[in-house]
Amino acid sequence: MTSPSLLSATTVLRALVRRGMRHLVVAPGSRSAPLAYAAAAAHASGALSVHVRIDERDAAFTALGIARSTGAPTAVVTTSGTAVGELVPAVMEASHTGAPVVVLSADRPPELRGTGANQTTRQPGIFANFVRSAVDLLPVADPGLGEDAQREEIESFLTPVLDALHGTDETPSGPVHVNVALRDPLYPASDDDHRHLRSWADALVRDAEDAASGQLVWPRAHPWSVADEPLLPEDAAAHRPPEARPVSPRPGTAHPVVLAGDGAGAVTARFAHEHGLPLLAEPSSNARTGEVAIASYESLLASSLGARVDAVILVGRPTLSRRVSALLRRPDVRVVAVRPDPVPWLDPGRGSETEVRSFAEALAVVGTPDAEWLPTWQESGAVADAAVLRHADAHSGLTRLHVARAVWDASCQDGSALVVGSSNIVRDLDLVARAQDPLPVVANRGVAGIDGTIATAHGVALGTGRPVRAVMGDLTFLHDAGGLLLGTGEQVPDVHVVVVNDAGGGIFQTLEHGAVGQDQRYAAAVERFFGTPHEASIAELCAAYGLEYGRADSAIELTAALAAPVVGRRVVEVPLERETLREFNLAAHEVGARAVEEFLAGQ
């Protein structure tokens, strides 16, 4: 008879494969060994792609990158104890972005909990605020049950938890936690165990094929992904109840814009194009494409043109700009949010905007724009964009805006996916990235932390199978340096990382702390506690991890570095100074807005 712990492990993984899981990330440990042996068998049969990471935090962010970029459930396996706690940051991010990450944490059986047993703590409930559902999967109570009956009992506990990955009419999709209590033996201890692993892995290949072909039909476990899938499929609202509150239309002409935040999707760009509406698209909206996407739109919001906006069709979650936040709070602006499903970042009843289920409803609410509305935005955006670039070009050497524009353009041209760090660089992109061909972009904007960005990029590359270019600041890079470590024999994804190195936390220069730091009474404190200067050698760090390293000190060198095919792993460091960042950033926004005003005055 198969060992109970091994049977639990194979039953759990089979349930996930049948729901579309194709990738599994495993962090090593003893208590989780049954899951590891099952994973090894599944990988050997080709049913699963399994990736091993020694750092649980990076394992979790790798799983997050796979889940965010594919929309498929992706599990991360850990042993018991502090290993489970290392997953919290990635689970938080998955919760706020609706990503279908599955935590499989191994645990001691009940008789060892609370007894002082080694590497044992209270694991059930550790993610209570962030997962959609959880189960403490205890060993089967009746050891006399046959294997089929044991599997049925395990599956009965698993099913409602895994169903929660998909969300409901009331709750958004998101991560779940399966805490698996495992008793000794924790390894294949008999011939029955060996036979079970072989036959199970062979059958798992058929399960994976059936799931891929649609014979095992489960709803998508996400509201969006950066794959070529719309946020709103044609029949998205078909299974939804009618809108609870009536929405009155706005008569006559209006001045609406479409605001695409994180995760809005390419369908948002298509909608804006079809209806001739100005599109203000953040980089990670995956909607920054087409001729209606407005360049340097933040400059326009700071102008008299922005003051004329009276309605916003909001899709996704905007997180980057205070001017956008101010627009959404204006009492004279009607905000209509297109949300076919519950969203993971907003508690019910907490938003002030009007919610609708479809773009058609939103269009009926905001009214018809006048004929000159879109052309004025397009022309003004081009003027602002040119002014901002002239401002950057007036500085000797490279600036952050040059780097952002070059990385964006290179990714559009060679078809790489782009992973962006959640700090200054994503805002630089928001200011200067040109709308070109659709570009898949992932940024961890759920809770906007800098942790796990390198691992996320690796996960995106592994999940999509396409090359990934990642761009981030030096602190973001150093914070996740462990994400560079791949074990011998592990699959090496194609990931090129561009590090904008200003030797510290440049984003604080652009906030109020930058102004405080100009006061000599606080200059030293601001530099130490916010600037966080360092002298870390990125070149030596790359050498330690065996990565190819390059440095770009000029536009020519950066262009050459970005022209290299994204094959294997490489880091390109771009050193910049931080001392004048505040003044440069303020001026960049001001010149754009001023150029727009001059253009409008001359019309």
Image (cartoon, rainbow, N blue to C red):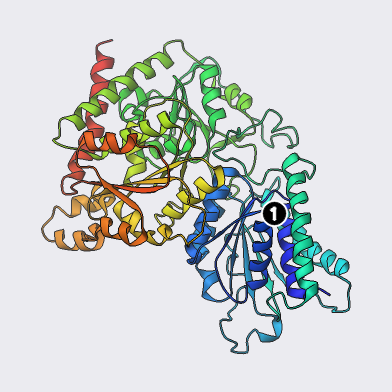
Residue 124 visible, this orientation: no
Asked which quadrant contains residue 139, the reply is bottom right
Q: Position of residue 131 (x, y in %)?
A: 61, 59
Say which element carries label 1: helix
Q: Amino acid at mark 1?
A: Ala
x, y percent for residue 214 = 76, 40
The image quadrant that residue 424 belongs to is top left
Up-down: is 592 above or below 324?
A: above
Neighbours of disc 1 within 10 Å: few (<14), some (14-19), many (20+): many
- Give the vertical position of 367 relative to 396 (above or below): above
Nearest the viewer among 593 and 114 is: 114
Q: Quadrant of the N terminus?
A: bottom right
Is residue 25 in sight in this rendering? yes
Q: Is residue 103 left or right of residue 533?
A: right
Residue 519 in the image: state x and y as whole percent. 13, 55
Q: Residue at x 77, y 58 (%)?
A: 159
Residue most extreme to the bottom: 115
Question: Can you identify the residue that label 1 sits on?
Answer: 164
Q: Which one is nearer the viewer's eye here, 550 or 503?
A: 550
Q: What residue lies at 47% left-to-right and 60% top-to-bottom?
A: 58
The C terminus - image quarter: top left
Q: Would residue 484 be found to the left or right of residue 400 on screen?
A: right
The one nearer the camera, 223 or 330, is 223
> Percent from the top left, x then y, of residue 150?
84, 69
Residue at 63 percent of width and 86 percent of height: 114
